[in-house]
Image (tube, rainbow, N blue to C red):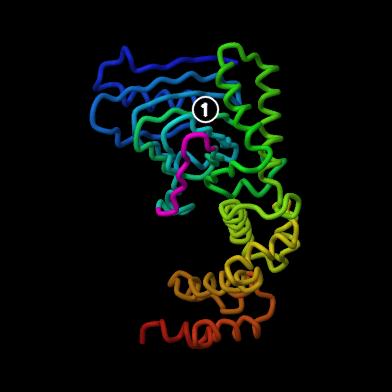
């Protein structure tokens, strides 16, 4: 593993922030930095990297890190496990994958799991210090399949695995200078085991936090939206794909006062309505649109469409066309 060090101490003041952006890209993940706080910007980082995993520790003045969509389109983008040593980190989604209004605040001693395959917006409102483990996507997905569809989640501090996970991350940071490939791989395997325990399905560990249920529901909805056109999509298939139980699928939707079936029907009807509104699809048959979005009975589609939008698909389309 290659160990590298970065510090702004000897960098001219006007060049420090650009230097720091390059350090983040080289030591952790491709990203953009912006909005440094007024006053001199200071930062330092140590990172030890192998081809697809690694560990880093950094301290910096307040600023913002953005992972834009153009940088987050890699199928092998890693996950980051971040232990907050001091200060605060505020994670928000960006673009199509999340809203900046849905901010996750991570305070001293707390841990966040971040999917770098999704765009995100990360604010450090003041001086910050953190430990970061860079996890290969296939390794974590093999243990926690549903996590591929989250953006960021703050892990709870109460579960039995939380303290060992925190201690493990801190030990990795303290040992950066002497980590060899074998030791680093062992650290990595233990981290993934602890994460898998903390993110285990609720059926296995009892009631979990609202944040974890929300993250699982986000992953479940993302999977269903990707497979909206599949007429065979059902709770059983979604549960198998995400490595959770069918019971948990139903519980996640019960939390929002609906069911998987009603939610799925609503998303399919919305997709059909968008197709009917699209001038480029004006010559496409209504039945073709319905079947393309997962309906397998035209009469059922027509009844459901009218119940939701107040008129039949045919009348809706005709009304929307110019004279």
Q: Quadrant of the C terminus?
A: bottom left
Foreground of the two, 2 or 249: 249
Question: Residue sitting at 34 percent across and 18 percent down?
Answer: 8
| Secondary structure beneath label 1 | strand
When the figure is inspected, residue 267 is found, relative to residue 80, above or below; the finding is below
When the figure is inspected, residue 2 is found, relative to residue 225, above or below; the finding is above
Question: Residue sitting at 29 percent across and 25 percent down?
Answer: 41
Residue 129 in the figure: left or right of residue 250: left
Rendering quarter of residue 252: bottom right
Residue 73 in the figure: left or right of residue 66: right
Question: Residue sitting at 56 percent across and 82 percent down?
Answer: 305
Q: Is residue 251 magenta?
A: no
Numbered-mark total: 1
Majority secondary structure of the magenta segment?
loop
Q: Residue 274 in the image: state x and y as whole percent.
A: 48, 71
When the figure is inspected, residue 131 is found, relative to residue 100, above or below; the finding is above
Residue ID for mark 1: 131
Foreground of the two, 173 or 311: 173
Q: Quadrant of the N terminus?
A: top right
Q: Residue 93 in the image: state x and y as whole percent.
A: 45, 49
Label 1 Cα crowd, 10 Å radius (few <14 / some 14-19 / many 20+): many
User: Which segment did they paint magenta?
Assistant: 101-110
Q: Residue 227 in the image: state x and y as whole percent.
A: 64, 60
Foreground of the two, 140 or 312: 140
Q: Is residue 102 magenta?
A: yes
């Amino acid at each position: 593993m290659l160990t590298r060090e970065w510090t702004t101490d000897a960098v001219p003041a006007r060049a420090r922030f650009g230097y720091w952006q390059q350090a983040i890209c080289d030591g952790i993940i491709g990203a953009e930095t912006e909005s440094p706080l007024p006053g001199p910007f200071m930062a330092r980082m140590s990172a030890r990297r192998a081809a697809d995993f690694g560990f880093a520790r950094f301290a910096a003045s307040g600023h913002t890190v953005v992972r834009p969509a153009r940088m987050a389109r890699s199928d092998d983008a890693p996950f980051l496990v971040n232990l907050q040593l001091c200060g605060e980190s505020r994670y928000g989604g960006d673009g199509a994958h999340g809203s900046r209004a849905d901010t996750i605040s991570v305070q001293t001693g707390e841990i966040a799991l971040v999917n770098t395959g999704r765009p995100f917006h990360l604010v450090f409102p003041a001086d910050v210090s953190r430990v970061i483990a860079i996890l290969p996507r296939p390794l974590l997905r093999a243990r926690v399949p549903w996590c591929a569809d989250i953006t960021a989640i703050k892990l709870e501090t109460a579960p039995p695995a939380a303290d060992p996970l925190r201690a493990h991350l801190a030990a990795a940071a303290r040992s950066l200078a002497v980590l060899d490939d074998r030791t680093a791989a062992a650290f990595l395997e233990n981290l993934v085991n602890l994460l898998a325990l903390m993110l285990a399905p609720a059926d296995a560990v009892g009631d979990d936090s609202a944040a974890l249920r929300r993250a699982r529901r986000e992953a479940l909805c993302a999977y269903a939206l990707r497979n909206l056109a599949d007429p065979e999509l059902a709770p059983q298939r979604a549960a198998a794909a995400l490595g959770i139980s069918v019971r948990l699928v139903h519980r996640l939707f019960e939390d929002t006062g609906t069911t998987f079936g009603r939610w799925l029907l609503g998303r399919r009807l919305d997709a059909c309505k968008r197709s009917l509104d699209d001038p480029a699809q004006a010559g496409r048959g209504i039945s073709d649109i319905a079947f393309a979005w997962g309906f397998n009975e035209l009469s059922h589609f027509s009844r459901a469409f009218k119940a939701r939008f107040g008129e039949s698909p045919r009348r809706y389309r005709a009304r929307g066309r110019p004279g």
